[in-house]
Image: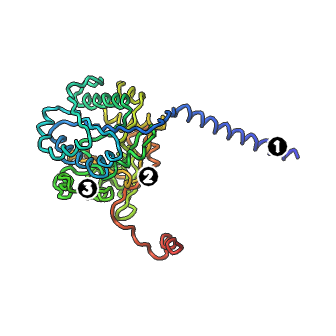
Amino acid sequence: MNKLLKLFSVKRVRVYEAQLRHGINGLIDRMYFKEHGGVGKEKRKIIFHSTVWGSDFLHSFLSYTVPSLLQEGNIPTLARYGYELRLFIYTHPQEYEEIAVQYETCLARLREYVTVSVIPLDGLKAGWWRDDYWHYVTSALIDQINRCIAEDAMMFDTRPDTIYGNRSITNAVDIVKGKNVCLAASHPRVSKESILQSGVFAGLRSMEKSFENDELVDLAFEHGHQSLLDSFDNEDSNVTYNGLSIRKIYDSMYTVIYNLPMVWLCNFVIDDLNYFESPGPYWDDRWDHRWPRLLLRQNRLKVTGSSDLFFCVDLTADDDRQMLKKKGFLNNDKFQARSNRYLNNYVFNSFSSVWRGRGDRPKSVPGDWHSSQEAVN
């Protein structure tokens, strides 16, 4: 009997220890994560935000980004749904007007759906950056965040070197509708030089062709930037250490571990404004690396896991974003920038996205698991 009582007491102590341990872990989690309250109504205004200057970027913006916005499933559909749509272009007005005159057909169609405002970069005073580039980008964003909060609007980050798949933007809005959250997604880099020479993308430029997401996935690898093509983890020498790890499942489906998914659709709160107004690292580091950490702490971030929902590509010059392939990274999906690795990078590392092209699923081989399941069904 004494042995039984002793055994029972030991088990009870272990149960209490486990309960205490779980309680402490839960307390630590609750102290770290500061969940932000949601919104009770759907926002009906969407602001498209673009900071763009320089001939090269202005031509990319008007040749590819704007036509991709005008695909039937994007801005025209949002307009039919009754959203109030505005586009703010932060730029140097004289330079913009000199180039925009070449794209009047495209811009005239844009104005059918969207109120377009051109904001002079030189007039911005927000932000504390001394360098012109970071001052422009950060000051424009702070100006826009203030506007979004004041007007109860969502913001879609419309980069001047990005092509969005048809329906991607509408899907993004539907995902976050009625929620006080932001939406992030992984995206590949494509060769800008290859895109400029492509007859297929010339159809987008002339607004005669649309790209569904699955077609854009195929085109991303067909015109891939070297940093994308070197990110497959089945090769011992690769660049997966930079945060993107790709594995081909079959001919047209890829599983993607991306440690740095980018925020595209934003529902800003005062904490975001305070964050970007405060002194800190450069723009790319803040937007891509650090701000998602705040969003996760406040439970205000959703990440799309399927290219069917949202997909876009980033036009990148061949001589830009070059990364050295390193040996010993077979099967790697870890982000190796140790001093730049935050909570959000660890969280995103556990999340696998799927990019799906147009190819058919491969036929099963007799005797494998897939064929046996098909036989049962």
Separation of residues labelled 1 and 2 (CA atoms): 48 Å
Please report the residue visible at 16 percent of the width from the left and 55 percent of the height from the top.
Answer: 197
Q: Which residue is mark 2?
A: 352
Separation of residues labelled 2 and 3 (CA atoms): 27 Å
Q: Element type at marker 3? A: loop
Separation of residues labelled 3 and 1 (CA atoms): 74 Å
Kind of residue at disc 2: Ser
Q: Nearer the viewer, mark 1 or mark 2?
A: 2
Q: Is residue 255 above or below residue 175?
A: below
- When asked about the image quadrant of residue 153, the answer is top left
**Contact (Cβ within 8 Å) of mark 3 with mark 1:** no
Kind of residue at disc 1: Lys
Question: Any mark on residue 307, and which?
Answer: none
- When asked about the image quadrant of residue 25, the answer is top right
Kind of residue at disc 3: Ser
Q: Which residue is mark 1?
A: 6
- Which comes sooner in the sequence, label 3 or label 1? 1
Instruction: Tell me if residue 339 can be seen.
Output: no
Please report the residue visible at 50 percent of the width from the left and 70 percent of the height from the top.
Answer: 369
**Counting other residues with Cα less than 10 Å from the Cα at mark 2, is it few (<14), some (14-19), or many (20 or more)?**
some
Q: Element type at marker 1? A: helix
**Counting other residues with Cα less than 10 Å from the Cα at mark 1, is it few (<14), some (14-19), or many (20 or more)?**
few
**Contact (Cβ within 8 Å) of mark 2 with mark 3:** no
Q: Which residue is mark 3?
A: 210
- Which comes sooner in the sequence, label 2 or label 3? 3
